[in-house]
Image: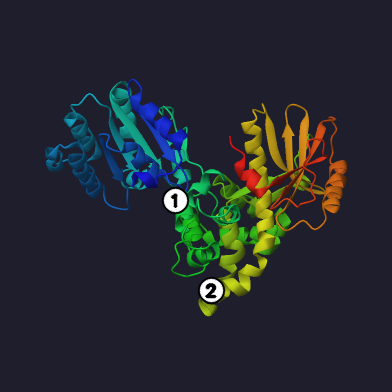
Amino acid sequence: MEEDFLGRRTELQLLEAGYRSEGGAFIPVYGRRRIGKSELILHFLGSRPAVYHVGKVATPELQIREFLDEAARSLGEPLLAQVAATDWRGALEAVEKAWKQPKKLVLAFDEFQWTAAASPELPSLLQELWDRRWKRGKVMLILCGSMIGFMEREVLGAKSPLFGRRTAQIHLQPFGFQEATAFHPRWSRTDQAKVRFVVGGVASYLRAFDPARSFEQNLVANLFSEFAPLFQEPEFLLREELREVASYHAVLSAIAAGETSIRGIANASGLAERGLTYYLDQLQALGYVARRYPLTAKKPNARQLRFVLEDPLLRFWFRFVFPHKSAVQRLGPARAFAELVKPHLDSYFGGCFERLCREALAAEYARDGVAGFTVGEYWDATTQLDVVGMRADGWIDLGECKWGAVGSVPAVVGELARKAAAYPNPGGATIGRRMFVHRIPARAPRTRDSDVSWHSLDELYATRR
């Protein structure tokens, strides 16, 4: 329903601009499963004249017939349902000919990868129609897909017949941590942060967490039952895009268990180091894994490279669900969670909090109009800094993150001072020191002339762009 649609203002504005533009519009929309692509398109279409077709694993004849039936219904042209088209050219030209109104007609192909798989000639046909008539006419073409590799190769790629034709594109991203609070507005900031730590900003995953139940009840119900909606979701994600899924499982399990180097991942996964780069490259291209280097003004040192699990659901699932699948079936969801997962959650959330703090610092810089910046972390043999904000104006923020209670304010401030002193600063940038904490202790100095600025979880969420 309309009132259930959340966010996506920028993307809606882009689609609206395409619809109102002179001439045609061609906008590919792509992104991972469950990110909200279909919901975005359907919300945009609303009551506009449009033909919305969802691709499937089916014969071309069946899909063409469904396309024409939908066109007859949605455009109010019942004769389209009687068109005896045997190919996509006949179907598309019949719809185009039947459209007599001055308004722009929207043709939206959702899950386009399946339609194109059944009809490999379709991208070339769309290119021909676009070049000959649509780009100067009154057709808006939307091609949507959840297989990112396919969309980047067959729609956006240089070898695609459609290359260079798009008038805009939308790579739909997860919701930011502040936007995601709209899914659970009555929850505490702590629980809003926790659900982000587990499922990130993917719309469908956020909707799976019932705001009328507690966070832990949702966690058990959604991830620790063999019938739960997210119990097998990571396997579906990997199977949709990749082959040799067992090898990718091994790689992701190794990283989730704490291995970050090529050698460590190879040893833990049982895969040869020489072949491991291929798997890591594929996972990085999908946004599931990322390469990280210590953030300094110096050139990155290849020996300090770390691989991290970038996707929150995969990170949680491979850390807590995948290794305990047998235990879940043996003990039951509630007991398996209580005995095998809950005792480790606060420690796990500590690392997740560090990621949220880096995201929040970037949001603060953007809000304040900082011209250029990079946010990351720093490590060497003796020092670990959870947050590094390197700005183009000669200022560097160095921060520590504490998800648990702060025992001694002087101790943590002194620890941050020692780490800041060890941070390489060859350019002589001004160093700002920050403490990111779940809750600010009563004795923390909050004056403007304090050496350290303190930021609570509530304050991070209050930072607006």
Q: Tell me: residue 284, above or below residue 259.
A: above
- Give the label on residue 160, or none: none
In depth, the one of 65 and 433 nearer the eye is 433
Q: Amino acid at mark 2?
A: Ala
Q: Amino acid at mark 1?
A: Arg
Residue 113 seen in render: no
- Give the label on residue 34, or none: 1
Task: Count how many numbered circles sit on residues in the image.
Answer: 2
- Mark 1 vs mark 2: give the one in front: 2
Answer few, some or many: residues within 10 Å of disc 1's Cα (few below 14, many 20 plus, some between 14 and 19): some
Quadrant in which the C terminus appears: top right
98 sits to left or right of 216:
left
Residue 345 seen in render: yes
361 sits to left or right of 304:
left
Question: Residue at left 68%, top 63%?
Answer: 268
Q: Tell me: residue 410, above or below residue 76.
A: below
Disc 2 is placed on an element classified as helix
In depth, the one of 186 and 67 nearer the eye is 186
Where is residue 70 drawn, in percent x and y? 22, 43
Disc 1 is placed on an element classified as loop
Q: Disc 1 or 2, which lies upstream in sequence?
A: 1
Residue holding disc 2: 334
Question: Residue at left 18%, top 42%?
Answer: 73
